[in-house]
Image (cartoon, rainbow, N blue to C red):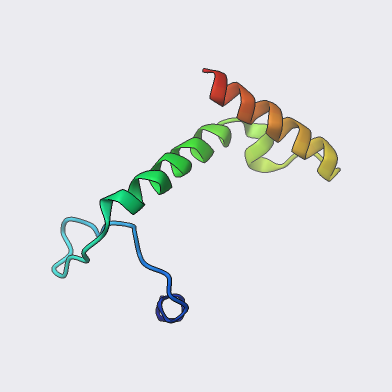
């Protein structure tokens, strides 16, 4: 964590509510990250993407595109 901060990165994940020391976060930075995390969570609902059954990278990428498009169109 400290190495990341030394490079200029900023933590945007909120701390748990039961933690004694609460870290201040920027909600405007957290919102896009949260949207992206939820998107990838939906894409990983497709078992073939989550477990990477395909042996060839081209086949995996093709199905990852299909899964991503399906999620976006829902």
Along the line of sight, which residue is nearer the eye, 9 or 67?
Answer: 9
Vertically, is 30 above or below 35?
A: below
Along the line of sight, which residue is nearer the eye, 35 or 28?
Answer: 28
Q: Quadrant of residue 44?
A: top right
At which x and y percent is residue 60? 77, 38
Q: Quadrant of residue 8?
A: bottom left
Assign the N terminus to one quadrant of the image: bottom left
Vertically, is 43 above or below 30?
A: above
Q: Is residue 63 visible?
A: yes
Q: In the rendered view, does 56 fall on the left or right side of 61?
A: right
At which x and y percent is residue 22? 17, 65
Q: Residue at x 34, y 45 (%)?
A: 31
At which x and y percent is residue 72? 55, 25
Vertically, is 37 above or below 12?
A: above
Q: Residue at x 45, y 75 (%)?
A: 4
Q: How many marks?
A: 0
Q: In the rendered view, does 45 fall on the left or right side of 12?
A: right
Along the line of sight, which residue is nearer the eye, 46 or 31?
Answer: 31
Q: In the rendered view, does 8 fall on the left or right side of 19?
A: right
Q: Residue at x 62, y 30 (%)?
A: 68
Q: In the rendered view, does 30 fall on the left or right side of 37?
A: left
Q: Residue at x 42, y 48 (%)?
A: 33
Q: Is residue 55 visible?
A: no
Vertically, is 69 above or below 33?
A: above
């Amino acid at each position: 964590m400290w190495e990341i901060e030394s490079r200029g990165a900023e933590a945007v994940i909120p701390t748990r509510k039961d933690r004694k020391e609460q870290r201040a976060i920027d909600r405007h930075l957290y919102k896009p990250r949260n949207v992206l995390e939820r998107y990838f969570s939906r894409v990983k609902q497709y078992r073939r993407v989550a477990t990477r059954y395909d042996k060839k990278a081209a086949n995996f990428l093709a199905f990852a595109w299909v899964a991503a498009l399906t999620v976006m169109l829902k």
